[in-house]
Image: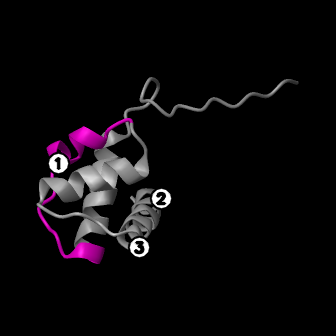
Amino acid sequence: MAYGLIFDVDGVIADSEAVNVRATARAFGEILGINGVKAEDFEAGIGRGAEAYVRAGARSHGRELTAEQITALVAARQENFLAI
C-alpha cells in the first residue's frame, strides 16, 4: 500500500487564516499586552512568513519589535495555534 502526505501551506486545501489570526492575537495580548488585534492588522504580512506576519500586526498598532519579541511571538503563536 502506498502512502502520501499533502502539505497545504498556502490555503488551497484548508483556510487556516482565521485560526492563525486568533493564535497570533492571543500571543500579542500575552507578550505585548496589545488586545483587540484584528485580521486586517496582519494583511501586510500574509504569505511572507511568521516574522513578517507578527511585524505587520505590531506596526498596525504603532510598534516595532525587537528580535527577542519576534522570537517570543512566533513561538507563542505556534503554541496557541496548536491549542485552538
Q: Quadrant of residue 76?
A: bottom left
Lateral position of residue 38 relative to residue 73, left or right: left
Q: Quadrant of residue 83?
A: bottom left
Q: Secondary structure at mark 2?
A: helix
Is residue 16 covered in magenta? no
Q: Residue at x 38, y 64 (%)?
A: 70
Q: Residue at x 42, y 29 (%)?
A: 11
Viewer-closest of 53 and 25: 53
Considering only order in the chain, which callout, 3 or 1, is on the residue closer to the N terminus? 1
Lateral position of residue 76 relative to residue 5, left or right: left
Is residue 34 covered in magenta? yes
Considering only order in the chain, which callout, 1 or 2, is on the residue closer to the N terminus? 1
Q: To which residue does mark 3 refer?
A: 68
| Amino acid type at image mark 1 | Asp
Lateral position of residue 24 relative to residue 35, left or right: right
- What span is in magenta? 30-47
> Does residue 69 sit above or below 83 in this rendering?
below
Q: To which residue does mark 2 refer?
A: 82
Q: Position of residue 20 (x, y in %)?
A: 35, 49
Mark identifier at residue 83: none
Q: Quadrant of residue 35?
A: bottom left
| Amino acid type at image mark 3 | Glu
- The quarter in which the N terminus is drawn is top right
Q: Of discs 1 and 3, which sits in the foreground?
A: 3
Q: Residue at x 50, y 34 (%)?
A: 9
**Label 3 neighbourhood size at 10 Å, few (<14), some (14-19), many (20+)?**
few
- CA–CA distance between discs 2 and 3? 22 Å
> Does residue 25 sit above or below 56 in this rendering?
below
Q: To which residue does mark 1 refer?
A: 41
